[in-house]
Image (cartoon, rainbow, N blue to C red):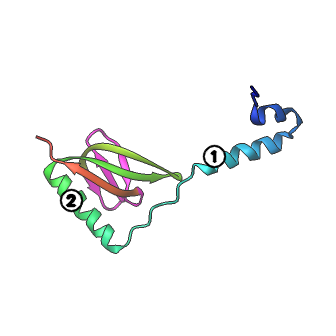
Amino acid sequence: MIRDRGNIKWNAMMLPEHVELLREWHEKDDYVKKPELDEWALQELSEQLQIAYHNKAEVELGLWEDNHIFKATGIISAFNVTKGTLSFEDGRKFPFYSIFSITYSSVD
């Protein structure tokens, strides 16, 4: 059985600059392009956020930040239009431009 060590066996022959460039290259493979929303999708997203806020429903936001997508769950406590942020009851704040999706269900 052949057990190859991949890049590990070649690290001794590589320049440190080359190793650093390979690491950066692998990190960039995980980057995700920001989802683009058209006018209709933005309007729908805005309406869903307002409904969730008025109903005090727990929401799961799809967020894009620093070339990565993640999800945040909570209850919306406030909108700050001047700063362009949305706040959860637990104190977390998210900029409007990073939100690209919302799913919600009413809390009973």
Q: Residue at x 78, y 41 (%)?
A: 19
* Residue 77: % across, % down: 23, 47
Residue 34 shown left or right of residue 43 in the figure: right
Q: Residue 43 at x, y = what percent?
A: 28, 69
Residue 34 at x, y percent in the picture = 48, 60
- Residue farthest top in this picture: 1
Identify the image quadrant of the C terminus. top left
SS for dot 2? helix
Image quadrant in which you'd find residue 90: top left
Callout 1, which amino acid? Answer: Glu
Q: Residue at x 74, y 45 (%)?
A: 22
Q: Is residue 62 above or below residue 47?
A: above
Q: In the displayed structure, would residue 98 be above or below residue 74?
A: below
Q: Which residue is mark 1?
A: 27
**Eyeballing the image, is 99 above or below 89?**
below
Which label was assigned to residue 50?
2
* Crowd rating for badge 2 (residues with CA inside 10 Å; few <14, some 14–19, many 20+): some
Could you tell me which quadrant the N terminus lies in?
Answer: top right
User: Which circle, 2 or 1, is nearer the viewer?
Assistant: 1
State how far apart marks 2 and 1 are (Cα).
Answer: 36 Å
Residues marked 2 and 1 touching at CB (< 8 Å): no
Q: Which mark is residue 40?
A: none
Specify start and end residues of the magenta stretch as a single range.
Answer: 78-98
Mark 1 residue crowding within 10 angstroms, few (<14) / some (14–19) / many (20+):
few
Secondary structure of the residue carrying tag 1 is helix
The residue that appears at 76% across and 28% down in the rendered structure is 2
At 30% from the left edge and 54% from the top edge, which residue is drawn?
102
